[in-house]
């Protein structure tokens, strides 16, 4: 995997169909296998409208405030990183999703994590980024371990679209540790 072939960029309206397909048309059981509660997802049309609005509002800003970055491999969008929730000036919780199954387990995330963390730390003036990864999502945990992101414990999580009470491994990277990734 050549790092020059991978970049991250802000979400655009052209990316929205890929995201909707990932959340609403993945194979049966896939999103549940990564700890998502389908009942906590908005409707597909509501998610589409919210993403379009997010892109349009951001377009009018002098500097981007998007919390969604698209992972691009060889000029093709293959996934996304989001940061949610965010406590600007302190921390955000990082999420990563590769929507193209053929692109999973190829090392893309090992490069895109670094790129996205760097953008998010600066964009939201963060001191640290947390990763609260459902324990059953072995691949995502392995990426953090391979990158050397510090493991800080476990907790049961209940935020966003994650199934309430999901056991998660928690990792943290501080602003001053990013260069070591």
Image (cartoon, grey):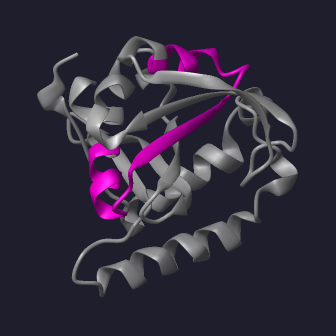
Residue 139 location in percent, x, y?
56, 16
Residue 125 is a magenta residue: yes
Name the image quarter holding residue 44: bottom right
Residue 165, how many percent across, how many down?
Answer: 87, 38
Quadrant where the C terminus is found in the figure: top left
Q: Residue at x 48, y 76 (%)?
A: 54
Q: Which residue is more in the foreground, 150 or 48? A: 150
Instruction: Name the residue: 40% across, 68% down.
Output: 13
Numbered circles on residues, count: 0
Q: Is residue 153 above or below residue 69?
A: above
Specify the farthest residue to the bottom: 60
Q: Which residues are magenta?
A: 117-144
**Residue 54 or residue 48, whichever sits in front:** 54
Q: Please name the residue shown 36% across and 65% down the image.
A: 12
Residue 48 is one of the magenta-drawn residues: no
Q: Residue at 58% across / 25% down in the picture? A: 152
Q: Residue 49's spot in the image, x, y percent? A: 59, 77
Report the side of 151 relative to 158 (left or right).
Answer: left
Relative placement, left or right, of 1 versus 112 is left
Image quadrant of residue 30?
A: top right
Query: Along the horizontal axis of the image, is 38 left or right of 124?
Result: right
Name the quadrant of the N terminus: top left
- State the image coordinates of residue 110 (x, y, percent, origin top left): 34, 23
């Amino acid at each position: 995997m050549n790092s020059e072939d991978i970049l991250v960029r802000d979400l655009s309206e052209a990316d929205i169909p890929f995201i909707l397909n990932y959340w609403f048309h993945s194979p049966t059981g896939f999103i549940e296998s990564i700890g998502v509660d389908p009942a906590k997802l908005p409707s597909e049309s509501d998610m589409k409208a919210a993403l379009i609005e997010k892109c349009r509002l951001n377009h009018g800003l002098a500097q981007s405030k998007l919390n969604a970055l698209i992972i691009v491999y060889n000029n093709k969008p293959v996934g996304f990183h989001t940061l949610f929730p965010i406590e600007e000036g302190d921390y955000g919780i990082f999420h990563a999703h590769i929507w193209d199954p053929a692109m999973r387990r190829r090392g893309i995330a090992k490069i895109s994590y670094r790129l996205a963390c760097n953008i998010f730390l600066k964009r939201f003036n963060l001191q640290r980024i947390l990763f609260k990864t459902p324990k059953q999502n072995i691949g995502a945990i392995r990426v953090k371990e391979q990158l050397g992101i510090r493991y800080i414990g476990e907790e049961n999580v209940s935020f966003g679209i994650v199934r309430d009470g999901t056991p998660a491994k928690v990792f943290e990277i501080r602003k001053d540790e990013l260069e070591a990734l």
